[in-house]
Amino acid sequence: MAGAENVVLQGCAALLGMGHALSLLVMVDDRSPQYGEAFIEAAEARGIPVRALHVRGRLDLGALRNLRAAFKAQDTEVIHAHGYKALVYALLAQSRRTSLVVTHHGETGHDRLARFYESLARTLYRMVDRVFSVSSATTETLVAAGVQQAKVRTVPNPVSLPAPNRDRERKPSEGALLFVGRLSKEKGLDVLLRALASQRAPKELTLDVAGDGPCAAPWKALSASLGLDARVRWLGVRADIPELLADAQALVLPSHREGLPLVILEAGACEVPVLASRVGGVPEAVWESETAILVAPGDVDAWSKALEALPMQLERLREGARRRGRDLRARHAPERWADVTTQHYREVSKR
């Protein structure tokens, strides 16, 4: 249940609110079904019509037949795919009467296999009707990589968190920083840990890490070797992100690459300042120097300097985050996302 999954859930709920007939098909890999099952459970909790598409291995012909039958039974007009595997299955299962849209959430590039699949997805984009890109920066990257510009539409991610309750607003813990995300190489948490352990970083700064992933063990070992055990808490996967944000003085995101990270939008909606890498769509989601400090990705020294300066800037940044919270919630409202998305569906509809 990462950012892309939450975007899908918010988008589906908003489209249903507009009166669309919609069904969410979740690919459940039988080798690790718990992830797909968690996604289905979250969709059901939101009242989204959902069903499982069980898949064995990389290409399951039985699953492909089931998908083709589902499209036919529902008289599907538009298929909206998220992720390269969903895209491959949708391309193979669609009929001539259906239109195919795919959302490009960004690229991780964290290993050779990921880079191969991401390159394959860009090639397959030639065969779809529209490619939704989550930020202007991502759109530029796609076009530079050879994706036909006429097919690409920039559709920023939605966020549905309400404004903070002023009457019940909690005072954030002194020096508390929060990281939320998958613990994988592209998130750059090792850079932040090294910066936090530097001589320049104020010792009162602490870090809560919410998330899990393949780098969890090596990053915990790195934290211990840097002497940060008393200042870093590893929270694991959490569902209470708004509450964690309310306890934090700032969200930190030291990523090497991003599309449009949902947690940046969540921080903005909760009126929490941001300290993040200047990558992907991050600059589009904040007001630099007003609600956020942006830092060069991968530069430990630059991050150390940013942490050193942060306490002196926090009051100004928190004021800016409060001023801009309403703007961000309006700009990324799920209803606005659904309206824009519907317009693009109508562009490609073959009915």
Image (cartoon, helix red, strand yellow):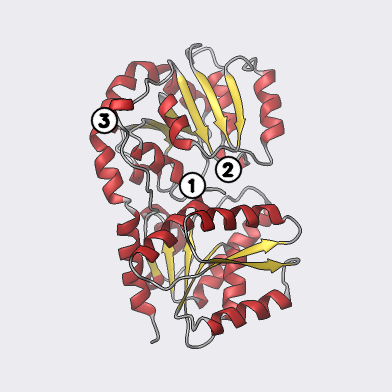
Secondary structure of the residue carrying numbered label 2: helix
Q: Are marks 1 and 2 in contact (CB under 8 Å)?
A: yes
Quarter of the figure that contains the C terminus: bottom left
Residue type pointed to by label 3? Gly
The mark nearer the N terminus, 3 or 1, is 1
Residue 327 vertical position relative to residue 313 in the rendered view, above or below: below
Give the amino acid type for the residue marked by disc 2 in the picture: Glu
Q: Secondary structure at mark 1?
A: loop
Q: For the residues marked 3 and 1, what is the alpha-carbon distance in whole angstroms?
A: 23 Å
Q: Which residue is mark 3?
A: 320
Task: Rate crowding at label 3 as few (under 14), some (14 to 19) or many (20 or more) other CA atoms within 10 Å.
Answer: many
| Residue 277 spot, x, y in % from top left | 45, 36
Asked if disc 3 and disc 1 are in contact, CB closer than 8 Å, the reply is no
User: Vertically, is 233 above or below 42?
Assistant: above
Element type at marker 3? helix
Which residue is rendered at x = 50% and y = 34% of the image? 254
For disc 1, the marked residue is 258
Residue at point 58%, 58% (across, down): 40
Residue found 37% across the figure and 48% down from its top? 160
Compare marks 3 and 2 and give the one earlier in the sequence: 2
Q: CA distance from mark 3 to mark 2?
A: 28 Å
Label 2 crowd (10 A; few <14 / some 14-19 / many >=20): some
81 relative position to 220: left or right: left
Q: Amino acid at mark 1?
A: Glu
Of 237 and 82, nearer the camera is 237
> Image check: 215 left or right of 165?
right
